[in-house]
Amino acid sequence: MTSRPQSRTANRVGPLRPTAGAHCVLRPAGWSRIAGGFWGERRRINAEVCVPQGPALLEAAGNLHNLRLAAGQAEGAYRGIYPFLDTDVYKWLEAAAWQAADDDSADEHSTAGLTSVGSVRSVESEHSSGSATADIEDIDAIVALIAAAQRPDGYLNSWFQVVKPGERYTDLRWGHELYVAGHLIQAAIALHRSTGRVDLLQVACGFADQVDATFGPGNAVDGVCGHPEVETALVELYRETGEPRYLSLARYFVDRRGHGLLAPPDQRDAVVGPVYCQDHVPVREATEVAGHAVRQLYLLAGVTDVAAEADDQELRAAAERLWAEMVARKTYLTGGIGSHHDDEDFGDPYELPNERAYCETCAAVASVQWSWRMALLTGQAKYSDLIERTLYNAVLPGVSLDGERWLYINPLQVRDGYQHPDGDHGVRRTPWFRCACCPPNVMRLLASLPHYFASADDSGLQLHQYATGRFGDETTRGRCAVRVATDYPWHGRIWIVVDECPADTAPWTLSLRIPAWCKGFRLVVEGEPTEAVPEEGWLRLRRAWRPGDALELELSLDPRLTVADPRVDSVRGCVAIERGPLVYCVEGVDHPGGGLDDLVFDPSAGLTEKHDPGLLGGVTVLHGTGRRRVIPALDGTRGGGDGTAAWWPYRSLERAKRASASVTADSHAAADADAAGQFELTAIPYFAWANREDGPMRVWLPTS
Amino acid sequence: MTSRPQSRTANRVGPLRPTAGAHCVLRPAGWSRIAGGFWGERRRINAEVCVPQGPALLEAAGNLHNLRLAAGQAEGAYRGIYPFLDTDVYKWLEAAAWQAADDDSADEHSTAGLTSVGSVRSVESEHSSGSATADIEDIDAIVALIAAAQRPDGYLNSWFQVVKPGERYTDLRWGHELYVAGHLIQAAIALHRSTGRVDLLQVACGFADQVDATFGPGNAVDGVCGHPEVETALVELYRETGEPRYLSLARYFVDRRGHGLLAPPDQRDAVVGPVYCQDHVPVREATEVAGHAVRQLYLLAGVTDVAAEADDQELRAAAERLWAEMVARKTYLTGGIGSHHDDEDFGDPYELPNERAYCETCAAVASVQWSWRMALLTGQAKYSDLIERTLYNAVLPGVSLDGERWLYINPLQVRDGYQHPDGDHGVRRTPWFRCACCPPNVMRLLASLPHYFASADDSGLQLHQYATGRFGDETTRGRCAVRVATDYPWHGRIWIVVDECPADTAPWTLSLRIPAWCKGFRLVVEGEPTEAVPEEGWLRLRRAWRPGDALELELSLDPRLTVADPRVDSVRGCVAIERGPLVYCVEGVDHPGGGLDDLVFDPSAGLTEKHDPGLLGGVTVLHGTGRRRVIPALDGTRGGGDGTAAWWPYRSLERAKRASASVTADSHAAADADAAGQFELTAIPYFAWANREDGPMRVWLPTS
């Protein structure tokens, strides 16, 4: 083992730590702590419910048993059918590690007293978000088990060691060995950064060295893994250890992909084919995101990392091009991506069906990870715009409000009478999955969430997301830090107090992201209303900030009615309701009769809002006006000879127009009696759906 | 072997021959022959191109090699990955058998001279549709090979004999053994009915007896096959041999399904789960079609057969209920069914996306087979309405006009820039598939097509579909037959001449189906315009018909604009164009610039029609008015602070309305100069799409 694990660095505890030489415009803020409010509560659930449940769930599902088999510490059959089951353990370890770091930093970055600044309506009380986090003994035991399972040459994969001995690296298309290695590396880095422990990092470096000695020029194997992930992990291992071989290996994997090493072009149609495996085109030449969404995004995270550390402008251009293409043509309003159940594929441009939205929770997590790399690489606010949208509306729906149950897929519509099958791809929250990739992925993201909220550069600090907490960095001129208190996303006011400044009195810049959806904002600096114009999404406030300086930013959260590009066929004639960063939906449980298939929304009738602290943990509810559409019932008979049969759901345009006119006339007649059959429509934030009962739901509302 | 193959019966050559005791309202007409016109040409291609290619394609794909392996006549590895590859051979044999019967009947039922009746615009010249049909030596050789592969106890399945010896009936969920048996039985019946040969029927009875001795009460196995098919085959074998055990066995398979024998309820989420296998609910209790579409429809064909022969009213009610549900909620305008690529599943009610329409060609074939059974069982015209729609718009698109290439799936939309992958599930016509179920399925349907066009009962004859040819039956009182000449579906006139009548002069009824889409018709009997009112789709003409009596029926084929049930989200705000039984589509190749994503159709501007004999083998083209929508281009920048980002495809309703208004204003301004950017839109019959070049296509046209 030639890598050189470094001692713990208290600064910049988080998944990404670009080197000083990285060609990033921004770097993650060294101290980011969320201490309350919306995300504080979500993270409290993660720390007190989700993460602590991990070891028992991994035990019950067999993941730990499988590692014991590999370590010679157990007997019996391998459990589960996937070759990547070790990654559930690694992702859980990563989550536990970030959570441990969060607990450690609680005292140092206290935000106590912050709520006295301004008249915060309901900022939540201070709490330690880690009070019931994973027991360190669990971490110790699992790390020891992993180390015991490792082969003397560094190789480590319970599936191949137990089920396919002697077949290492013979099935790169489906074997997932390097994907598993990548998650091991990320877990090891998290433990190292969070707690300073080097044991798992040594295991990870041992495996990375084994991979490095096996793959690449002059070695035995010229190949890549069917599931990208090791690329971004290797770049981070380079960052953590300083070992340049890991960066070279990552670059090799990035560049060898797309040359048919995994699946020849004539097997494009194969079950695990070249597009699915991200092997259909070199990423430098790619013009659109394609194939298995999570694989594509993990790859692009690695591409962006390599671009940053190697100053590879061609890779950077590819990443920028592919991000823009994905967002413009293949992203749901929620930020969710990947529309096909089949092959977990991105789908074609504008092919964004609501009912069959796959929108894997893992893909949303991966999207946040990639966009954050892009934000740091470029400094552009749009990447954090998408992160915000994705966190609230594509990651968060994947976990129940109580932290006990999960969704693997996240459709934007459920019809009346839908039977809600259980299971990995069912639309009912489930305690765990056979392919349990999503739950620990959400756990590790929420545990490291503060890392994605703020950045720094030589000019000062940037707040990308708004949450009650403390955000700061050790800049070249000293420490800069601010405390934030906010009731966002329920209320648009954000109080910011400068907490630490460089010792000199030179001005520095506090940059605040004005979300792209925001139609207006109000800024008060030290009690003075202040005019400011955002530049490409950033409100850049340059000033000789001193400790105690206070700002108040209020973003307009007025509800918005949104329509889609007309090429998105699935939502033609529909609007969606948004408020602030939140996408809203309607659920059957809130509506008389419970059905939504015949719902028509009147966008001209306005929306009212009301915060309901007793509903779904406290959400702002929007009310509008709906009515029931009159849909002719089919009776199975043949009907008249006018070209429309009573057993057939398609009818002539003329007849439909006549029917519509008569309904309208009837409605007008009925208006005197009962307000034309209208009723109050209730919309809740989409992230909170499916937390009360099974039933219909829709994000996009037909308007006629 | 206890079954008793009967000698050849010249009457009623076709896949279905209900017994005299069957509780069917109608029986297939004994003599049905198509001798020209639209279907004559499609069947000529089938007979001269598709069917003759079969043996070479089956040789190249390995199917015959696999049977040789099972027969001990070859060495080497099994080819292909599916356990049901023998069925391709059986379905081809069935096609070749029906084609042979068609050739035999050509002289007997000549329609020569018919075109002199009336001023037929362009009825095609007489031809023998079987001039280049499969060589009888191919049939002999393949039948001999199948017989050689059969085990002494009757079992016959090359996959299990070669790849899984000793594992018979141990994997009913995926093994397909009874499914394969069903297709063997159907091929054997076809050869027996068509040519009188009993050799393959003896093989089939041997296998059926082995199954009968293995499954069911008192036998070793209580189980059903994961892929239904054997049920309908066993009923037909009962009809062919008179052996009641086969009917009992079919009923056993129908009733044991849905009790978790294949996949326990807790495996609902499994890859080959209970819904996929049609094992989630007993068919008597089912309220909706579900799961793998082909499996569901083959099962329902068998259910309908059992209902007819056993006079099982509960099964009949289930079939009627499920047909109505399928048609009302899960059928595309084309008659295509099965919207999910994933699991080849029906999809949820109204979930009918156009781009991801799976619409497997086999499902359309199965739909025709089932609906024909329902038509005979009930006598209701709606079943033949759906058959007509499905034949023209869901079966026929599956084969290229030249008969050389196939589509497995049949989407209703292809976007601009779609890359048209090859292969089983690609949207590019392909010479053969790895899972080659569809091509021989179309072959056998087209070869037996006349069988589905006419029926008889004691009152007389019923014409369900209109094609140039001769249709008749040996009734209880003597022979009734008519000759038909028509240019349908291009022209609505249908000439009918009574050809044979019972010896007495008592009246009998000629019933003509008036399609549900038909807004008007004109009837002339013996030169006299005649008023007649259809009853539930049937124009029943009771008269003392004598040979030479002539009728002229003219159906209005005026183009129609059609809209869908508002719950079909994918086509909200769209219309489709239909003419007669044909659904139309637009293809990029016919339009300036070639793109269709930005197309807007003006439904108020009218349609004109023109028959183009030089286009796509001669089709009636419809012309309308379209324009290009102005879709704002995204530039990747952040855009203004008005809530709409220039990198995001979703925008505010207000902004979209303003943009639309300004475009309209601009258009009005431009109208003086260049007719507001309008252009002539060209629609072709959907069945003929993808026969010129790869490119975009759409059936449903946005109107605003």
Image: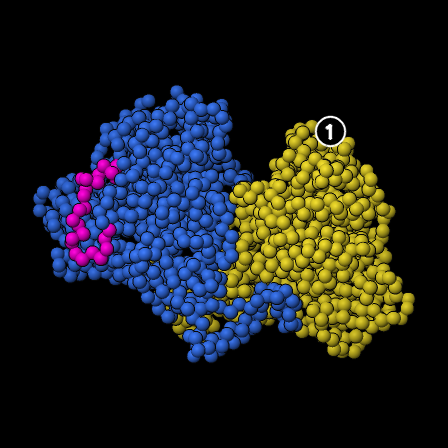
Chain colours: A yellow, B blue
Subunit that carries the residue with mark 1: A
Residue B642 vs A204, above or below: the answer is: below
Neighbor class of circle 1 (other Cα within 10 Å; few <14, some 14-19, many 20+) is few
Q: Quadrant of residue B625?
A: bottom left
Query: What residue sits 44% from the left and 68% below the top?
Result: B627
- Left or right, B234 with respect to A693, comes to left
- Left or right, A178 with respect to B527, comes to right
Q: Residue furthest right?
A: A503
Residue A60 vs A236, above or below: the answer is: above
Query: What residue sits 80% from the left and 69% below the top?
Result: A509
Query: What residue sits 28% from the left and 55% below the top?
Result: B489
Q: Nearer the viewer, residue B324 or B580?
A: B580
Three-letter code, disc 1:
Gly
- Left or right, B393 with respect to B492, comes to right
Q: Nearer the viewer, residue A7 or B4?
A: A7
Question: Which residue bears the numbered disc 1?
Answer: A72
Specify start and end residues of the magenta stretch as a single range. B101-124
Residue A594 lies in the magenta-colored region: no
Query: Residue A430: in sight, yes or no?
Result: no
Q: Quadrant of residue A665?
A: bottom left
Query: What residue sits 78% from the left and 41% below the top?
Result: A205
- Which SS class for mark 1? loop
